[in-house]
Image (cartoon, rainbow, N blue to C red):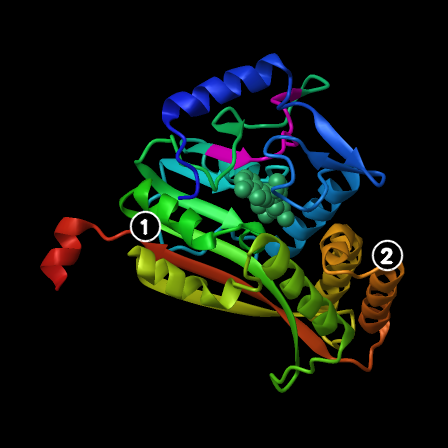
Amino acid sequence: MASTHTAYDWITERISMSLESGIGRHLWEGGRRYHVYREGRYSLPNDELEQQREELMHILVMDILDQKLFLAPMTEPPQKVMDLATGIGLWAIEMGDRYPDTNILGLDLSPIQPTSLTNGVRRVPPNVTFQVDDVEDTWVHDDDYDFIHMREACGYMRSTPTVIESAIAHLKPGGWLELQEFHWVAEKEDGTIDPNIPVNRYMDHMMSAAASTEGRKIPIVPEIGDIMKQAGFVDIEKKTYRVPYGPWPKDSVSRRRGAVFSVNAELLLPTSDKMLGHIGLTPEQAESLYSDCVKMFHDSSIHCYATYYVWYGRKPDEATDEADR
Ligand SMILES: C[S@@+](CC[C@H](N)C(=O)[O-])C[C@H]1O[C@@H](n2cnc3c(N)ncnc32)[C@H](O)[C@@H]1O
C-alpha cells in the first residue's frame, strides 16, 4: 500500500477538505473539467461529455453481458457491496434497485454521482451511498463485504495489485471480487495482432506514456487472474467477449455493439492529449493518430475486435476450504 495514512489522518483530511469545499470543486484545463481531490491521479476529465461517454459504456457493457450486473456465482444476494471507482454510479444504482436489501457503497475521486433528490425525483436508491475516496489509499472501510466490484478502472490504477490486496482484506471469507475491463488491443478475426493498425499504434503510445510518466503498466487486463491468485483468491474465472471495432459485422447484435463501441472510443481518444503530450507527441500528431483510428472504425473492410474481460474470484473460506484440501 503506497500510503501510510491512518484512519485518523483520513478523517482529518476529509474534514479539512470539506471545510475548504475542496471535495465539491473541480479543475478546468484545455476546456475540460478534472477531479480536484488527489489532483492529477486520474488523467481523464469528469465533465458532462465524459459522463455521457460513461453512460454509453454502461449501456454497451450491459448489452454484452445480457443485462447481468455481475457474473460471480453468488448463491445468495450479497448484503454488503462496494463499487470501486464508481464514476457516475450507474452500476451501483442498478444494483441498489435490483437488490433493495443490499447496502452498496460507491467510491470515486470525483463527486459526479447523482444526489438522492434531483428536481424532487429520487435518483439514488436509499440503500446506495457514495463517497469521494482514493481506492489506492489505505482503506478504512469495514472488512466484512460480501462483494467488491470494479469496472473500467484497472487501466488507470498506479498499482492494480495493491487495490486487489485491499479488496481481499476487506471481504468476508467466502466473499467475491469481480473486475470488468475492456482490453483495447485490436485483434484480427484470426486472433493475430497487426501492430500497424491505428488503434494498436495508439495503444503502443499509451503504454509508453503510462509506463514512463506514472510507472503504470497497461494493458494489465489479461494478467488480472494471476494478480488475484497472488493476492490469495481462489475459484478464479475469466470470461471474455469480442467487441468489434466499428459496425462492420453482418449480424445485427455484433453490428450494434461495434457501432456503440466505436462511438465510445471516438469520445475517449481526445482525452489522451495530456498522456500523449508527456511522451512528446505534439497536439497535431495526437490529432492525426485519433483521426486514423476514427477512419479505421468507419472502414468496413478492417475487421478487428477489442475484448471485454470479466474476472472474478472468491476469498477462501478458511474452515470450508481447509476441509476440502
Ligand atoms: C472509466 S471510469 C469508470 C466508471 C465506472 N466504474 C463505470 O464502469 O461506469 C473510471 C473511474 O475511475 C475513477 N478513479 C480512477 N482512479 C481512482 C482512484 N484511485 N480512486 C477512486 N476512483 C478512481 C475515476 O474518477 C473515474 O470515475
At 70% across and 77% down in the image, what residue appears? 304
Please provide percent x and percent y for residue 14.
51, 21
Is residue 114 highlighted in magenta? yes
Circles 2 and 1: CB atoms closer than 8 Å: no
Q: Quadrant of residue 258?
A: bottom right
Evaluate whether residue 64 shows in this view.
no
| Residue 75 marker | 1
Is residue 204 highlighted in magenta? no
Q: Main secondary structure of the magenta part?
A: loop
Taking depth in this image into account, of 170 and 282 the one nearest to the observer is: 282
Where the N terminus falls, by quadrant?
A: top left
Q: Earlier in the sequence, mark 2 or mark 1?
A: 1
Report the span colored magenta: 105-117
At 47% across and 42% down in the image, what residue appears? 136
Taking depth in this image into account, of 208 and 72 the one nearest to the observer is: 208
Callout 1: helix, strand or loop? loop
At 64% across and 35% down in the image, what residue appears? 39
